[in-house]
Image (spheres, helix red, strand yellow):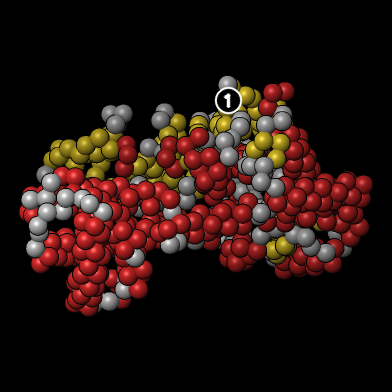
Amino acid sequence: MSSPFSQRRRLQLYLAAWAFAGSVLAALLHILLGLNWMSAGALALPLALLAVPISLSSWYFCRAMPLTRTSAVQVSGTTVVSALITAALWAAVGQLWWRALGLLGLPVGDIAVASLMAVLVGFGALAYVLSVTVTYLLLAYEDATEAEQRLLKSELAAREAELRALRAQVDPHFLFNSLNSIVALIGADPARARSMGQLLADFLRESLSLGRADRIPLDREVGLIRTYLEIERARFGRRLEVAIEVAPSAVGVNVPPLILQPLVENAVRHGIATLVEGGCVSVRASVAGERLVLAVANPRDPDAVARRGTGLGLDIVRRRLATTFGDDASLAIDPGPAMYTVTMTLPTSEER
Amino acid sequence: MDRLRVVIVDDEEPARLAVRQDLDAIGGIEIVAECANGFDAVKAVSEHAPDLLLLDVQMPKLDGFEVLELVGREVPVVFITAYDEFALKAFDVHAVDYLLKPFTRERLEQALTRARQRRQAVGGEPTPVVAPQTLRAAAHPGTPIERVVIRDGPNVHVLPVGKIDFVEAQDDYVAFHVGERTHLKEQTLGDLEQQLDTRRFVRIHRSYLLNIERLARVELYAKDSRLAILTDGRKLPVSRSGYQRLQQLL
């Protein structure tokens, strides 16, 4: 927290408080000592104005004695003593000002020095204690808010780091299976082995560079998926058919990288791979109003025993959507007995 | 050395290509069939009675262990898989060998030699193989099975256990009752009981294993003898110990 003088709004607050205090003091002088309103005002308002810097000094007082590291006795003792000293000095100035007003020709009347001092010291001391208390409260409130913000920030940073690590992963099974296919083809069909190796290199290069980006146009993501599916076609042959439909209006929409890829991977692994005759993985992208709708569908064997890794890919996608878009994005699963469909909806543009 | 008649089973074409090429290079092998799934493999074994099955483990619908369960009495098997987690199971079910992809031609040759030796040791007769329950226990240690594979001539039925109403013991066979249909399998009811999830299937009688979801109610019809009424109205006898097991479960 910076010093109070630098904060204009807070200064205004103090001034308002002391205009109020000035009026109260004037009223007290009027009631207790019988001063007329004009004299009371002339004495009280400038005095109250003088008290503003004094009361602002309570900020330094409070910083020097943080409540958490000082005993209550020490705090209250010091507060009372400094309140009395400050009030006495302030009252003395008030006394002088009162004399000066008399010299200036104001009808100051006949008031005992002692009773004026008593009223001024009493009022000043109380006001000082009050301002210390208020400052302590303000400081505590600001500390709490600051701590909360720090916590939020560190949580957010941790989650981002986690997601970054998660999305950078290429499924090791996919790599392993592809490598095996390439090795198998090297002797039997060298040309196919070579083209599959090239596809795999393309896929890895592209997924590395996409993983570093914050947002990518949808057609790059779709390009990556095409490469992926082409590699899988080498393994599954005619069992794997592919239908990709991207509406022209969806092509340029920005999406988080590798948001669709895990869904397509699931479609192959938990869908096509469980079927003797295979089937068609379909990927559809369209824009409805302000929203991008992405759907991945695949047939599957309803009786197949769930394979390892079920749900993890989906879970990562769901969490990434939640951290990136909050409630603005959604992911719906339609686990039909024969057809499994995952539909993702996200905003086409973001307020950032 | 007589030619070894081999069937290749793998759902991935590149893998079949590689095995075929290696076998051609090694020589002394006749490839009688190439299958892309377990069903075709079972059919090919009936049709060709091969000397050896080169069998992938992870395949759709019917995996390698299930194929072995169905044909294991007739033909020796060499497993070929990308995953080493099945290796122990493979030896438990007396597979001739277990090859990890990618493998060298020398390693494949070694497996073929082993298969020939095994064949000569039993005088040309197919290897007598372990009982199916051992296979299943090995293929799925500790976890109850999710489906039952039944061979019906060249055809194979894959039965998700949830579809089974009840199982009845019939001499050396068990009869799976699924709605109106019945499938016979050579197995004892006790073995089957051990494979199934004990929270879903209860031995209500020496001769009956009941899918608990099909039970509507139990009726007392004579002293100490009860009847289980199934949701479709069929009635099965419940023994005294069977009734105790039912009570424990419910």
Q: Chain of mark 1?
A: A
Q: Residue at x 74, y 41 (%)?
A: A224
Between residues B220 and A30, which one lies in front from this camera angle? A30
Q: Secondary structure at mark 1?
A: loop
Q: Is residue A295 above or below residue B72?
A: above
Tell me the quarter of the image containing the N terminus of chain B: bottom right
Between residues A90 and B23, which one lies in front from this camera angle? A90
Q: Residue at x 70, y 47 (%)?
A: A213
Residue A265 drawn at (x, y percent):
65, 43
Disc 1 marks which amino acid?
Glu
Q: Residue at x 19, y 45 (%)?
A: A38
**Label 1 crowd bin: few (<14), some (14–19), many (20+), radius 10 Å:** few
Residue A82 drawn at (x, y percent):
24, 73
Asked if residue B13 shows in the view, the reply is: no
Between residues A10 and A74, which one lies in front from this camera angle? A10
Residue B201 drawn at (x, y percent):
35, 47
Q: Residue at x 42, y 58 (%)?
A: A5
Q: Is residue A92 above or below residue A349?
A: below
Residue B34 drawn at (x, y percent):
78, 44
Between residues A226 and B244, which one lies in front from this camera angle? A226
Q: Is residue B22 above or below residue B184?
A: below
In-image side of B168 versus A254 (left or right) = left
| Residue position for label 1 | A290
In-image side of A312 versus A150 (left or right) = right
